[in-house]
Image (cartoon, rainbow, N blue to C red):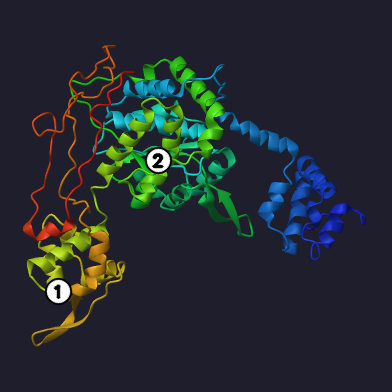
C-alpha cells in the first residue's frame, strides 16, 4: 500500500482527518472541500494517496466523499453529458390542448395499426412525460401485441419523437439503469422487454419502484466500502414486447395493444416522416406543459367506476390531462381506459384460476372434502388448464398445490373419508377465498371480450396513404353479424366456477375526425 500523502502540520485537510472521530463532517467544511477539489483536479496522484488515508479512518462513506469532492469543472463536464437530449424550444404562443392531442393521435395513426383507444392513450401518455415533475403517478406505457410484425417498435420509436428526454435503453444493466434515471430523469424506452428482463431480473424491481413518487427509491450498495445508497428512480417508462409482461409491471401499466396490418390497411414509413412535424409537436407539448403544469399537478380526477384501484392510479395523470384540455377528451380518455383495462382484466391471475378450478372440482364431485391426491387428479384432468404441465412439463405436485393455496390462507389437513384418513382439503376452508376472489363478476379466462371492431381498417382515422378522412356514417354496433368476432373456448362443465366475463364498454357514438 502506498504511503499516505504528507502535508504540512497546519494543513486544514490533515486537521480535518484528525478530527473525523469527533466530527464526521470535518472534511466537508467549505474551505476544506475547496482544497480537496483543487487537489483532485490538479494533482490526481496526491488525491489518490489522500483518499487511501481517508478510507483507512473508516469514518466516511467513500461514495459520498467521491461525490462531494468532484471539481466544478468535472461537474460541468457531467452536465454537458445531458446534451444527449435535444433542446426543445416551447411554442411561441399558448396552444389548444384538445387540438394538440388530436394532432398527436393523428400523427401516431399514420404509422401504426391500432384502435382509437390505444392511439388516444398513447397520445395522453406522451403528454404526461412532459408533466412528470408535477404528477404523483408515473404509469408505464406497455406496448404489446400477440405476435411479431405488429408495429410495436414503430410505436415505441414514434413515442420517442414525442416524449420529453427520450432514452433508448434496450441493452443496459440494472446498475447503469438506476444511475441513468437519477442522473438524467429521462423517459426510458425499452424494446424487447421480455428478453431484457430475462437477462436482467433485478431491473424489474427498479421499474416497479418508479410507479409512485413517494416510493420511487431503490437502495443499492456502492463504492469500495459498499455503503447502502438511495437512488431516485422516478420517471416515465415505456416497455415494448410480445405477449404479457410480469403481473407486477402490468399492474402499473397503461396497455397499448397493437395488431398486425392486413392487406387492406396501409401506414406511412416512420423513417421517411417529416422531422419538422415531430419537432413542432414536441414544441407544442412543451408549451402546453409549461402553461398547464400547475393545474394538472393539483387535479384529482374521480376514479373510473369498474376499474380496479391500480388501473385508476395509472390513469390519474392521463385523466388530469384530458380534463384540462376539455372538448371530447374527458369522455374519450375514460372510454379508452375502460376498453383497454377491460380487456386486460379478462385474464385472471394464476392463483384465482386455481381457486376457480378447485371450486369446480368440489362441485363436480358434489363433495365437501377431498384428499389432496383426488383434488390433483381432478385438476390435471383438464387439458385446457395449466396444472397438467405445471412442473416443467409434468403435473403439479401436492407440495406445489399446497404452496399456491397457502397464499390464500388455505392449508391441507388430516381428513377422514369413510375408513381412510389422509391429507386433504375441506371445502369450508375455501369459503372466504371463494367469496373474495370468485365473486359473480370475476372474469373467466375461457371467453374473449367482445369487440365492436372488425379486422379491417375500422378506425375513425384517415388512411395513411390516401390522405382522405374516413368518417363512420353508421357507427359499428357490437353485433355478432357486423364485424364483431367473438372467440369463446368450449369450457368443460367442471369449470363453471370461474364466473362470467364482463362485457367491455365502448363508446360507439364518439367518432371524431382528425
155 and 117: which one is in front?
117
Which residue position is annotated with label 2? 315
Place residue 342 in its image quadrant. Answer: top left
Mark earlier in primary sequence (1, 2): 2
Locate residue 39 relative to residue 219 in the image: left or right: right
Q: 298 above or below 405?
A: above
Image quadrant in which the N terminus is located: bottom right
Image quadrant in which the C terminus is located: top left
- Mark number displayed over residue 156: none
Q: 180 above or below 280?
A: below
Q: Residue at the location (13% across, 75% down)? A: 368
Q: Position of residue 67 (x, y in %)?
A: 69, 47
Which residue reaches farthest bottom?
419
Q: Position of residue 163 (x, y in %)?
A: 47, 30
Is residue 275 at least partly visible in the picture? yes
Is residue 196 at least partly visible in the picture? no
Secondary structure of residue under mark 1: helix
Q: Residue at the location (55% across, 25% down)? A: 86
Q: 219 above or below 295?
A: below
Which residue position is annotated with label 1? 373
Secondary structure of residue under mark 2: helix
Q: Residue at the location (12% across, 66% down)? A: 361
Q: Position of residue 130 (x, y in %)?
A: 51, 32
Number of on-image labels: 2
For label 2, count other residues whose C-alpha is less than 10 Å away and answer few (under 14), some (14-19) or many (20+): many
Place residue 256 in its image quadrant. Answer: top left
From mark 1 to mark 2, how far is it between C-alphas?
Answer: 45 Å
Amino acid at each position: 500500500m502506498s504511503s499516505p500523502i504528507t502535508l504540512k502540520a497546519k494543513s486544514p485537510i490533515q486537521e480535518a482527518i484528525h478530527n473525523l472521530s469527533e466530527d464526521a463532517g470535518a472534511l466537508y467544511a467549505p474551505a476544506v472541500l475547496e482544497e480537496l477539489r483543487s487537489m483532485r483536479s490538479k494533482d490526481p496522484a496526491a488525491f489518490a494517496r489522500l483518499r487511501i488515508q481517508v478510507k483507512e479512518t473508516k469514518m466516511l462513506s467513500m461514495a459520498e466523499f467521491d461525490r462531494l469532492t468532484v471539481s466544478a469543472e468535472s461537474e460541468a463536464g457531467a452536465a454537458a453529458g445531458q446534451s444527449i437530449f435535444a433542446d426543445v424550444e416551447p411554442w411561441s404562443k399558448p396552444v389548444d390542448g384538445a387540438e394538440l392531442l388530436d394532432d398527436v393521435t393523428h400523427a401516431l395513426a399514420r404509422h401504426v395499426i391500432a384502435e382509437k383507444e390505444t392511439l388516444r392513450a398513447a397520445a395522453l401518455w406522451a403528454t404526461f412525460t412532459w408533466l412528470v415533475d408535477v404528477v404523483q403517478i408515473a404509469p408505464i406505457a406497455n406496448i404489446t401485441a400477440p405476435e411479431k410484425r405488429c408495429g410495436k417498435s414503430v410505436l415505441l420509436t414514434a413515442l420517442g419523437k414525442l416524449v420529453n428526454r427520450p432514452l433508448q435503453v434496450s441493452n443496459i444493466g440494472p446498475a447503469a439503469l438506476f444511475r441513468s434515471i437519477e442522473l438524467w430523469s429521462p423517459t426510458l424506452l425499452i424494446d424487447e422487454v421480455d428478453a431484457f428482463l430475462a437477462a436482467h431480473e433485478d431491473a424489474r424491481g427498479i421499474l416497479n419502484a418508479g410507479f409512485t413518487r413517494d416510493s420511487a427509491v431503490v437502495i443499492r450498495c456502492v463504492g469500495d466500502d459498499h455503503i447502502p445508497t438511495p437512488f431516485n428512480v422516478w420517471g416515465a417508462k415505456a416497455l415494448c414486447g410480445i405477449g404479457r409482461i410480469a403481473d407486477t409491471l402490468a399492474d402499473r401499466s397503461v396497455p397499448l395493444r397493437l395488431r398486425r396490418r392486413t392487406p387492406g390497411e396501409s401506414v406511412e414509413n416512420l423513417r421517411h416522416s417529416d422531422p419538422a412535424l415531430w419537432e413542432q409537436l414536441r414544441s407544442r407539448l412543451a408549451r402546453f406543459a409549461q402553461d398547464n403544469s400547475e393545474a394538472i399537478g393539483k387535479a384529482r380526477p374521480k376514479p373510473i367506476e369498474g376499474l380496479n384501484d391500480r388501473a385508476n392510479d395509472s390513469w390519474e395523470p392521463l385523466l388530469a390531462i384530458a380534463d384540462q384540455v376539455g372538448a371530447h377528451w374527458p369522455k374519450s380518455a375514460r372510454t379508452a381506459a375502460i376498453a383497454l383495462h377491460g380487456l386486460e382484466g379478462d385474464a385472471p391471475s394464476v392463483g384465482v384460476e386455481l381457486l376457480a378450478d378447485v371450486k369446480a372440482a368440489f362441485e363436480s364431485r358434489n363433495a365437501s372434502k377431498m384428499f389432496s391426491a383426488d383434488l390433483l387428479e381432478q385438476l390435471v384432468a383438464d387439458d385446457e388448464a395449466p396444472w397438467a404441465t405445471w412442473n416443467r412439463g409434468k403435473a403439479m405436485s401436492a407440495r406445489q398445490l399446497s404452496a399456491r393455496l397457502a397464499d390464500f390462507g388455505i392449508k391441507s389437513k388430516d381428513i377422514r373419508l369413510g375408513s381412510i384418513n389422509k391429507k386433504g382439503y375441506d371445502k369450508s376452508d375455501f369459503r372466504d377465498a371463494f367469496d373474495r376472489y370468485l365473486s359473480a363478476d370475476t372474469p373467466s379466462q375461457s371467453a374473449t371480450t367482445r369487440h365492436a371492431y372488425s379486422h379491417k381498417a375500422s378506425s375513425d382515422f384517415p388512411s395513411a396513404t390516401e390522405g382522405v378522412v374516413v368518417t363512420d356514417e353508421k357507427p359499428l354496433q357490437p353485433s355478432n353479424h357486423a364485424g364483431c368476432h367473438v372467440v369463446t373456448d368450449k369450457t368443460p362443465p367442471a369449470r363453471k366456477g370461474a364466473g362470467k366475463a364482463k362485457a367491455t364498454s365502448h363508446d360507439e357514438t364518439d367518432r371524431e375526425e382528425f
